[in-house]
Image (spheres, rainbow, N blue to C red):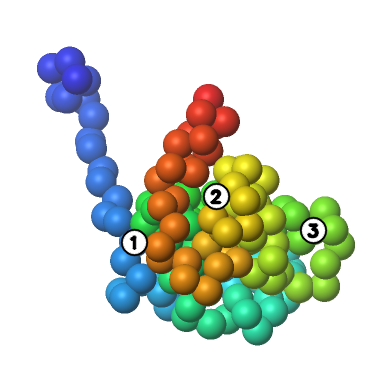
């Protein structure tokens, strides 16, 4: 960065989202966004393991967490769903990364084994 930019800018670093500490906060964000629509949330979106899946799928990046929440809500609204479910998040992840079902953290039991960074590289290329 140039010295002029450094003098005029305030750098804000958002810490990585951690499943053990941030699961309840992530669930609160999901339910808060859904409530604004208003859109009910299914029981599978109310579980802590769902938050862990979302955090993992987002590579522990807060901005990615928000992206997937908004994409899932959009899919639920397009499909005129009665409630927001984990399936909407799985569809949002698949649409954005083009991954097979075995590499989708919202579908796999052993989701933590999935290297989401490999799929997020595709995601970042699409955002350009």
Q: Local crowd at mark 3 within 10 Å, few (<14), some, or many (≥20)? A: some
Label 2: state its secondary structure. Answer: helix
Give the residue at mark 2. Answer: 67
Q: Camera-side residue: 33 or 69?
A: 69
Q: Residue at x 69, y 62 (%)?
A: 88
State the count of labels.
Answer: 3
N-term mark: 3 or 1? 1
Give the residue at mark 1. Answer: 17
Cβ atoms under marks 2 and 1 closer than 8 Å:
no
Q: Local crowd at mark 1 within 10 Å, few (<14), some, or many (≥20)? A: many
Residue 77, disc: 3
Q: Camera-side residue: 18 or 122?
A: 122
Cβ atoms under marks 2 and 3 closer than 8 Å:
no
Q: Position of residue 72 (x, y in %)?
A: 66, 57
Q: Camera-side residue: 62 or 109?
A: 109
N-term mark: 2 or 1? 1
Residue 33 visible in the snapshot: no
- Give the Cα distance between marks 2 and 1: 14 Å
Which quadrant holds residue 106? bottom right
């Amino acid at each position: 960065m140039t010295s002029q930019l450094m003098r005029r800018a305030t750098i804000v670093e958002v810490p990585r989202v951690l499943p053990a500490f941030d699961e309840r906060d992530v669930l609160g964000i999901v339910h808060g966004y859904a409530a604004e629509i208003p859109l009910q949330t299914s029981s599978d979106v109310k579980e802590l393991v769902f938050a862990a899946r979302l955090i993992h799928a987002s590579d522990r990046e807060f901005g990615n967490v928000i992206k997937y929440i908004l994409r899932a809500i959009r899919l639920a609204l397009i499909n005129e769903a009665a409630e927001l479910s984990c399936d909407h998040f799985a569809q949002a992840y698949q649409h954005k990364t083009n991954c097979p079902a075995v590499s989708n953290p919202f579908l796999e039991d052993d989701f933590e084994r999935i290297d989401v960074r490999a799929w997020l590289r595709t995601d970042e290329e699409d955002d350009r």
